Image: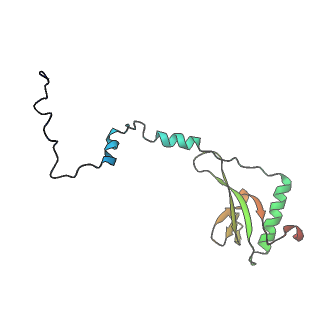
Amino acid sequence: MDNFPYEDIINLPHHRSKKRKPMPMSARGAQFAPFAALTGHGDAVNETARLTDSRIELDEYTQQELNRRLVWIKEHIDEDFEVKITYFVPDEKKKGGKYVTKKGIPLKIKEFENILVMTDRCEIPICEIIEIESTEIDFLEFE
C-alpha cells in the first residue's frame, strides 16, 4: 500500500464524545429513512381506500312498521325495556357512512328534533333508524 492516501489515519482510534452519549443502534436507521416529500399523501390514499356503506332506502311497509314501533315506544317510555336499534351514521369526510347497532333502554323522544334518546344519553336520529328489535317486547301483540 504505497500510495494509499489515508494510511496515516486508518488505524487511529474512533473518536467518542465526552459530552454526549452515543446514539443507540436502534435509532441510527432513522437517519437513512426515505424523505417524505408528499407529507400527508399516504393518509389521503388511505382515506380514499376506506370503504363506507350506502344508505338503505326502506320500503313503505318497513317504514310503517318502524313508525308503529316508535309509537309503541313513545306510549311506554316510562317502562324499562331494552331495545336493539340499527341506524345509519353518515360519514363526516365522504359519501356514505356506516350502520351501527345500539342496545339500550329508551329514555325519551325529542319530537321537535326527531331524536330518540337512550338512558346512556346516546341520541339516535329517528330518520336514520332502519330496524327496532326487542327480546323483551313482542311488538306484534300490540297492533
Q: Where on the picture, by quarter, is residue 119?
A: bottom right
Q: Residue furthest top?
A: 3
x, y (%) of residue 102? 68, 63
Q: Is residue 20 left or right of residue 49?
A: left
106 shown above or below 20: below
x, y (%) of residue 42? 48, 40
Which quarter of the rendering shows the N terminus? top left
Q: Where on the picture, by quarter, is residue 38?
A: top left
Q: Is residue 133 left or right of residue 112?
A: right
18 shown above or below 44: below
x, y (%) of residue 49? 58, 41
Q: Is residue 105 left or right of residue 10?
A: right
Which quarter of the rendering shows the C terminus? bottom right
x, y (%) of residue 71? 80, 68
Q: Residue at x 79, y 52 (%)?
A: 58
Q: Residue at x 61, y 50 (%)?
A: 91
Tell which of 124 and 50 is nearer to you.
Answer: 50
6 shown above or below 38: above
